[in-house]
Amino acid sequence: MSLARHVDPDEIIQSLHGLHMSSAGRQHVHSQGGTSHITPYSTRYASKQEISKFKIPHNGAPADAVHQMLKDELDLDGRPNLNLASFVGTYMETHAEQLMFENISKNMSDADEYPAMMQMHARCVSILAHLWGVQKGERAIGSATTGSSEAIHLGGLAMKRRWQEKRIAEGKDTSKPNILMGANAQVALEKFARYFEVEARILPVSEKSNFRLDPELVKQNIDENTIGVFVILGSTYTGHYEPVEEISNILDEYENKTGVDIPIHVDAASGGFIAPFTHAKVKWDFSLPRVKSINTSGHKFGLVYAGVGWIIWRDEALLPKHLVFELHYLGGTEESYTLNFSRPGAQIIAQYYNLIHLGFTGYRQIMENCLSNARLLSKSLEATGWYTCVSDIHRPVGEHSFLGTAAKVFSKEDETSADYNPGLPVVAFRFSDEFKKEFPHLKQDTISKLLRAKQYIIPNYPLPPNEDSIEILRVVVRESMSFDLLDRLITDICATTQDLIDNDKADLAILSKSKDTSTEKEYSSSGTHADGSTQGRGGKRPMSEGVHRSVC
């Protein structure tokens, strides 16, 4: 029998912490390096030295070796289709992917060089304008953007300049512009206000207002310096549509009393590709004269990969002329109103492909399917008695409270979204009050972490300020959420919850200790929970002062 020595694990861990990787590479007895190799793993990067991370290396490395090393590192990422936190699409059909790859080198700024691509861009603008109810006689104008964030900035800036021009013409002060939005607004809306020096009047949301912009608070906070109201068609927290028509009516009444004309910009980042196609009836678009501009994300429910958004103004008169640049570039002349110049054109082509390939009925089928699956997930979670949904697309029209575990999963065989509250296919849920009473020591955040071990990415985070005592888990049901995957997800959530119930509190404590200790994390965005509490908390400032990304 061979001899064996005692191993002190603390000593080994300490020595490894003190051993720089480059030193470790020099101490290896094999792989003497050089760039000659038989397989990607036989280069010096396999065992002799690490890949350069923060400075460009003096010598390069074989392409297949670098490809393999980067591929191996990226294997540590989550699986895109199981990233249920994101609204951004992770699936496209093969023909669309082929078109994107064939046109991946085309630049949207080179309009004269790629006229066919620019024609497709113009067609997309026209299709969206008609889809969103542009009225006869109006000359809608719009543009592709890199996403809804840029589009929101462009829409907000146009509102500010129109307000300034009108005030200057009337000889009035222009130093105190303000804009209204709910506390549930995505960070891009607040960024606009900060970057373009507009007072952001961020109105608190509540359970009474369905965690969305409260029309009564809008009425109380508008004045002659209000450049506009951001109204969100699909809150990123709970999926609720904000009441565009009700807010429009309030602004109509205000103008009748005061003569002050306050426009609406609809942030339809997700809802812009859902509301027009579903059976659920909601008035939100250019059919309302008060709505002057709308943005959406093609890379969300427009079903294109990340990198494309859209903004449309109902008439070109609403876009101040001095914001539009006439560009003379590479032999051509074009008009431009964007924050970026060079940007990929492949996503524009993919967007046009989807619009033509799917058509109205194709988009309707996909969106109705997403909502149907979201309703099934919602009702299944509530049927356990362990969870209550904060979102309510699974409840009959006008009903916003939990109907109890005995509620029917399906009300009729041919039901559609018209039978339920309108909204995004989002399931925001939390531990039920009964569950918290029975198991007060169990943390909801642990569910998120345990599901991550099964590769599901389902965030747990607090609702906006004023309601941030409530934490929610949230699932975005995208096109790629098949019925089979949904069935497995429901099973895994239930099994994980049961495992949590069956385990002792001490056994679960270790889950709260994990954190990213990499150098990259230390020197880039901190992303830490300073108070050691849970996702969505901590940071350098209290939540009431921070900007809320809300996991888009």
Image (tube, rainbow, N blue to C red):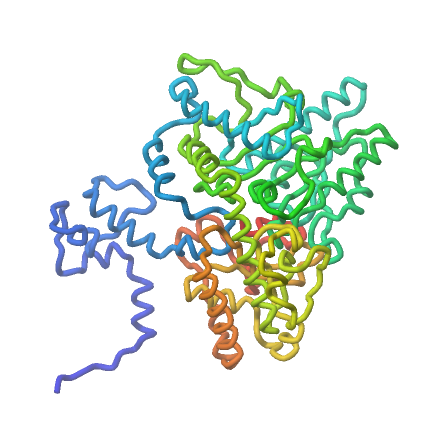
> How far across and how far down the image is residue 358, in percent?
46, 40
**With respect to residue 74, does 200 lie above or below?**
above
Residue 530 visible in the snapshot: no
> How far across and how far down the image is residue 8, in percent?
30, 77
Q: Which quarter of the figure has residue 93?
A: top left
432 sits to left or right of 508? right
Q: In the rendered picture of this protein, how many numbered marks are placed on residues?
A: 0
Residue 188 visible in the snapshot: yes
**With respect to residue 428, does 224 lie above or below?**
above
Q: Can you name the residue that lies furthest to the bottom here?
A: 1
Q: Can you name the residue that lies furthest to the front here?
A: 413
> How far across and how far down the image is residue 315, in percent?
65, 24
Which residue is nearer to you in this view: 326 or 5?
Answer: 326
**With respect to residue 2, does 36 lie above or below?**
above
Which residue is nearer to you in this view: 413 or 285?
Answer: 413
Which residue is nearer to you in this view: 164 or 286?
Answer: 286
Q: Which quarter of the figure has residue 517?
A: bottom left
Q: Residue at x 73, y 35 (%)?
A: 178
Which residue is nearer to you in this view: 75 or 392?
Answer: 392
Q: Residue at x 11, y 46 (%)?
A: 36
Q: Can you name the residue that lies furthest to the right here?
A: 257
Q: Quadrant of the N terminus?
A: bottom left
Q: Residue at x 52, y 68 (%)?
A: 447
> How far across and how far down the image is residue 56, in percent?
29, 40
Q: Residue at x 81, y 31 (%)?
A: 224
